[in-house]
Amino acid sequence: MRFLFYTHSLVSDWNHGNAHFLRGVMRELLARGHEALALEPADGWSRTNLLADQGEVAVERFARDFPMLRSQVYGPDFAHEKALDEADVVIVHEWTDPALVARIGRARREGGRFTLIFHDTHHRAVSARPEIAALQLKDYDCVLAFGEALRQRYLAAGWGGEVATWHEAADTRLFRPLEEERRGDLVWIGNWGDGERSAELAAMLIEPARRLGLAGEVRGVRYPPEALEQLATTGLKYRGWIANADVPVAFARHRVTVHVPRRPYVEALPGIPTIRVFEALACGIPLISAPWSDSEGLFRPGEDFLVASDGEAMARMLRDVLHDPALAASLAASGLRTILARHTCAHRVDELLGLIARRGTDAVRRQIPLMEAAAR
């Protein structure tokens, strides 16, 4: 089948974690014999900021890291109807321009044979509710929400028709344990953001690292001067943006990492972890998390990772993991087993194809058994 993804960006992962997941999903689809093309706006904020931060070399780097993936930029004059006419399944990300969301839906209503799916991977249904409420989703066959709490928001608001939960996952072709020299204690990979977790990062990352005298590094973007000043009081070196393809090596060179969720997810959308949880566990690095409610039972807290209730507990758990090789090895092995059993991009493609088999157009549903048989 021919899959068409309307993305915010596939090429740029600058403050854009959904690119990680979609790359893995597209690679899995290609491995099964399907076709996959991403479309992204030429002026998207992630791509624009990546180019400003890193230059064209970052785009060239994507092509080297993921030579099998195709992404095409579009501008105001792009022939969307032609692209849609050539697709079997179209998946539209929630950062897509609202007018284009409506235009794609209209093409489906006016005779489009493709199955049309809307994909939400953000907290704007809570933090920017009017923007999501204004989207024209009545002509979409299904909505994919990356957590049950988000799915319930869509259902309660009456946005779209069928709404299914489709969690993110690890691209295990990329994220896997590597043999590297352990050069540091702690690595944190994440963006500072818009004040959604500033206090939490100070309490759960910066202060414990300072108190324990840990060495390591911090990677990510959008760190304001005050954040850099706080990091300068620790042994953690800020090293800016990191290409997602380099993250497995960064994990392998450190002995532990932490997860600090954004406040909107903790307070309003429980059960939704950042994709970094999936990726870290897939790399076999021990993980200690700030509090969040795993309301859907995705993991086994206490076995797959530790949960620190506050900064004091975080410091204590970091010390334990760094000084107890058996504990560190147990956490790493348990987390990796859970990822491989339940949370790979292959699992998510299985779920996607199952959804299409139930909700897809007749022409698309007839292709699935033939494609799966050919893949086997």
Image: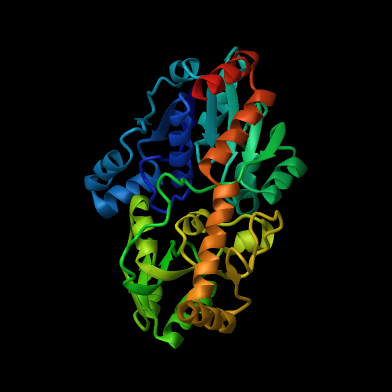
Where is residue 221 shown, x and y percent of the image? 38, 61
Q: Decide if residue 41 is on the left or right side of residue 328.
A: left
Which residue is at 46% across, 47% downward? 172
How many marks the image carries: the answer is: 0
Q: Nearer the viewer, residue 35 or 302?
A: 302
Q: Nearer the viewer, residue 110 or 256?
A: 256
Q: In this view, does 266 lie above or below 51?
A: below
Q: Which residue lies furthest to the front in this view?
A: 326
Residue 288 visible in the shown view: yes
Q: Decide if residue 292 is on the left or right side of residue 168.
A: right
Which residue is at 41% across, 31% downward? 39
Where is residue 372 shown, x and y percent of the image? 55, 23
- Tell me the colour scheme of the image: rainbow
Q: Is residue 360 above or below residue 184?
A: above
Which residue is at 35% across, 36% downward? 42
Q: In which quarter of the image is residue 67?
A: top left
Q: In which quarter of the image is residue 370?
A: top right
Where is residue 246 shown, x and y percent of the image? 33, 54
Q: Is residue 206 above or below residue 23?
A: below
Q: Decide if residue 373 is on the left or right side of residue 296.
A: left
Residue 287 visible in the shown view: no
Which residue is at 44% across, 30% downward? 31
Where is residue 242 shown, x and y percent of the image? 33, 57
Q: Quadrant of residue 237?
A: bottom left
